[in-house]
Image (cartoon, rainbow, N blue to C red):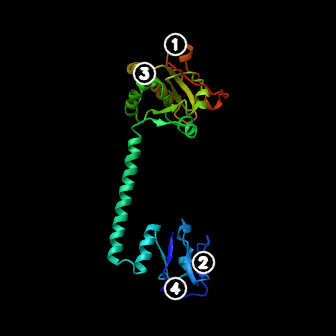
Amino acid sequence: MPVLINHKRCNCLPNCFAANVCPKNALYVDRPTNLVTVKAEVCGDCPAPCLNFCDRAALKYAPSLVELDIMARELAGEITVEQAIEERKQVAARLKAEAEAKVAAAAEAELHPIKFTQENFMTEVAQSELPVLVDFWAEWCEPCKQITPILEEFVKTFAGKLKIGKLNVDEEPDIAGQLRVQSIPTLVIFFQGQIADMIVGALPKPQLQARVQRVLEAVAQLQAQQPTKGTAAPPPAAPPSRPAANRPGGVAPSNLPPQPPRRPRGH
């Protein structure tokens, strides 16, 4: 809780008991000037015990540093009461606009695939309660660009049922190497940290949607049978007769042995 000092009301010098109890040493007596001084930026979320040991007319609390600045200039006579009120209105309007913009940005972000990186892969993918589709791609890969609008559409189509994101293999080669991704685009669907399906190549939208739907149906069936957490991953959603490169590995990514990074080949 940031505080300021109204020196016109401060009459406890040469000592200041409030400064003596300050847990962060933000409040102190400046000996050269013999004035009680406060480093308001140090106060942070301190519960302000100093207020309990001071005349509240001399030591004032403000909810933020911005409000503290307005209050300080008002006490110093630099601005009138009316000007202080107007400034507070402007600050409130700005904070409201910033909050609304943040909410709008978050809502907009939910309409697009997530960017997966080494930092968020475990949290967003391996620990996700929802199935997660990871698109392994690269800027130079033309087939990757063909499925991008499909995945953008799937974000809305499967909202609340499937998390969708993209992982740039040039930026995150270690993850691609550990999962043995050798060509792109490769789409891997995870559930509870394990591979439920792996799709290599840019499939047309109907085929891709059918594969995704099969995984989601298998997940729903599994959850109906075992609704508690910690259940095993669903069986492969696609027929076992497809090529080996397109067959789910069924291995948790965190348990895979490290593989040397490799540059994926265009499919």
Q: Earlier in the sequence, mark 2 or mark 1?
A: 2
Residue position for label 3: 208
Circle nearer the viewer, 2 or 3: 2
Residue at image position (59%, 30%) is 173
Residue at image position (60%, 80%) is 30
Label 1 sits on what residue type? Arg
Residue position for label 2: 28
Tell me: 142 left or right of 249: left
Label 2 sits on what residue type? Tyr
Q: Earlier in the sequence, mark 3 or mark 4?
A: 4
Residue position for label 1: 242
Q: Secondary structure at mark 2?
A: strand
Residue at image position (40%, 19%) is 204
Residue at image position (63%, 32%) is 254
Where in the figure is residue 128, as x and y percent of width and height? 53, 37
Location of residue 187 with respect to 116 vertically, above or below: above
Crowding at mark 3 (Cα within 10 Å: few <14, some 14-19, many 20+): some
Measure the C-alpha gap from mark 3 to mark 4.
Answer: 73 Å
Label 4 sits on what residue type? Cys
Measure the C-alpha gap from mark 2 to mark 3.
Answer: 67 Å
CB contact under 8 Å: marks 1 and 3:
no
Crowding at mark 4 (Cα within 10 Å: few <14, some 14-19, many 20+): some
Residue position for label 4: 10
Report whether residue 226 is seen. yes
